[in-house]
Amino acid sequence: QVQLVESGGGLVQAGGSLRLSCAASGRTFSNLVMGWFRQAPGKEREFVAATRWSGGNTYYADSAHSVKGRFTIFRDNAKNTVNLQMNSLKPEDTAVYYCAADAVGTYLPRSAREYDYWGQGTQVTVSS
């Protein structure tokens, strides 16, 4: 079992920044894959970014509201968390952001179905 707890959400103006953190406990073995997803009201949950719990390779969503170049997923070894640094935020980034863990860890998946454990979510609201 892996327990995930997100923190760092809040209200920010467009163009601002937020950093989300995901603390994992339990079976945090090195091949665990960590992902960030988001879900806006009335929309499906969508992939944002993924990396390994041990750090290293990263994978970002490449969609109409691309986060590439604005968001960075990274491992904080000192705090034992996987974080999502969000810069140049836009109103369309408003959503509940979820941390997720894939216990198989063969690759960095973008499908929510590949992830075994989920946090409770943290709200991010970007005002225009």
Image (cartoon, grey):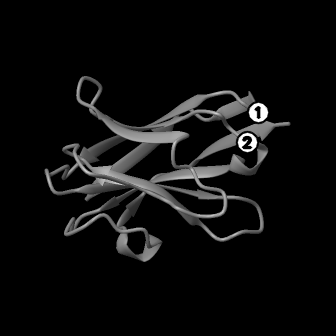
User: Relative to 55, is 46 on the left or the right?
Assistant: right
Q: Secondary structure at mark 1?
A: loop
Provide the residue designation for mark 2.
Answer: 90
Residue situated in front as seen by the camera: 119 or 11: 11
Q: Is residue 78 left or right of residue 16?
A: left
28 or 14, which is in the foreground? 14
Q: Amino acid at mark 2?
A: Lys
Please give left or right for residue 103 compared with residue 70 in the image.
left
Q: Earlier in the sequence, mark 2 or mark 1?
A: 1
Q: Which residue is outermost to the front?
A: 69
Q: Which mark is residue 34?
A: none
Residue type at the position of mark 1: Ala
**Residue 61: x %, y % from top left:** 50, 60
Q: Position of residue 32 (x, y in %)?
A: 22, 56
Residue at image coords 67%, 37%: 89
In the orientation shown, which residue stands out farthest toward the top? 78
User: Do tag 2 and tag 1 residues touch (Cβ < 8 Å)?
Assistant: yes
User: Label 1: few (<14), some or many (≥20) within 10 Å?
Assistant: some
Q: Residue furthest left?
A: 30
Say which element carries label 2: loop
Q: Position of residue 19 (x, y in %)?
A: 52, 31
Question: Which residue does the image show at 20% across and 49% down from the upper left?
Answer: 28
State the mark number for residue 14.
1
Direction from residue 44 to residue 62 in the image, left or right: left
Residue 44 position (above or below residue 15) = below
Q: Toward the viewer: 1 or 121?
A: 121
Q: CA distance from mark 2 to mark 1?
A: 5 Å
Instruction: Examine the rendered structure and indicate whether residue 42 appears above or below residue 127.
Output: below
Residue drawn where x is 19% and y is 44% of the image = 54
Vertical comparison of 1 with 44: above or below:
above
Give the position of the C terminus as an image quadrant: top right
Q: Residue at x 27, y 44 (%)?
A: 25
